[in-house]
Image (cartoon, helix red, strand yellow):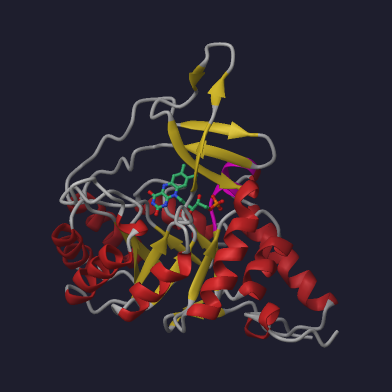
Amino acid sequence: MEINLSTSLCGVRLRNPLVLASGIVDTTASALLFALKNGAGAVIIKSICPEPRTGHKEPILHAIKGDSMLNAVGLSNPGLKIAVEELKNAKSRTKEPIIANIFASSVEEFGYSAKEVSRANPDLIEVNISCPNVEDEFGKPFSCDPDLAAEVTRAVKENTNIPIIIKLSPNVANITVIAKAVEQAGADAITCINTVGGMVIDTKTAQPIISNKVGGLSGQAIKPVAVKAIYECYKAVNIPILGTGGVMTGNDAIEQLMAGAVAVGIGTAIYTRGIDCFDKINQEIEEFMQENNYNSIKEIIGLAHKENKK
Ligand SMILES: Cc1cc2nc3c(=O)[nH]c(=O)nc-3n(C[C@H](O)[C@H](O)[C@H](O)COP(=O)(O)O)c2cc1C
């Protein structure tokens, strides 16, 4: 039986459902191409903002038992000018999808970033809204407020013709409220989820381990949070979902597809299991499909929402 691993995200064909998540490798073309060479179906660049940013001082990462970690990298990146050249370079060297990722500190800056990054003609633009709005009196993250999230979505849409994916944060009371707001504002897709807020204290020094004190939890520990977010958003909106969070195995990926994702991001697994995890997870997905008589990924997407006929 011929197994078809391909899927599509906003009309962009992916040869398999595994997508390199943003921030796991840097903003260079060579790092993106390396992930594609190692089996990724599409790749997302690390978040880019208009001007270069150094990020937080070390320690910025802390490994947590069980394929998980806490990070507060502080969104270090070389700025739009350099990153756009890297995206152009990557685009010219592959036919597989290259996805940009932007963040900004104001609605206007999101619009500007969308316009600038579009010059590289990425296949899709992911919009990281998990950063605070400096124009807001309290510096509220765009991801936590439906009106702010919608404003960003509109500003990005007004400045590009490339389909946009709004990346949602799980650190909210009800993620579907944000999902609905960005869908209504014109988002072409959503990513569920970014990292979960967390903190680790070294009991010997009685101090937080990472320099920023608090950070984002990723990896296996957050997989159930991601599955719930995907499942709930699938019911709430009609735009496609890029699942992300804690995928380590083929079974983890299948779980997110069944919850309603059309493709699945791979992040922490690259740190804890190595770059060959793309090939391994794809192989496990294929074996699962063979054993369970599925011919194509499309048969699996959203299955958890249908009555169980097995
Ligand atoms: C070290 C690190 C850096 C990250 N940087 C970014 C980033 O720049 N932009 C972004 O949108 N997400 C960023 N993320 C979030 C991931 O893209 C992903 O949403 C999250 O880690 C959950 O997936 P995972 O459990 O497979 O790692 C980062 C995650 C990690 C672990």
Magenta region: 266-272
Question: Which residue occupies the foreground of this view, 189 or 228?
Answer: 228
User: Which quadrant holds the C terminus?
Assistant: bottom right
Q: Is residue 172 visible?
A: yes
Q: Total of numbered circles in the picture?
A: 0
In percent of width and height, residue 262 lies at 55, 76
In percent of width and height, residue 110 lies at 20, 61
User: Which quadrant holds the N terminus?
Assistant: bottom right
In percent of width and height, residue 254 lies at 69, 69
Left or right of residue 257, residue 29 in this image: left
Assign the magenta stretch its main secondary structure: helix
Q: Is residue 286 above or below residue 200?
A: below
What residue is drawn where x is 55% and y is 65%?
229
Query: Does 188 lie within the magenta span?
Result: no
Left or right of residue 5, residue 107 in this image: left
In percent of width and height, residue 253 lies at 65, 65
The quadrant holding residue 151 is bottom left
Residue at the far top: name it: 204
What residue is drawn where x is 19% and y is 70%?
155
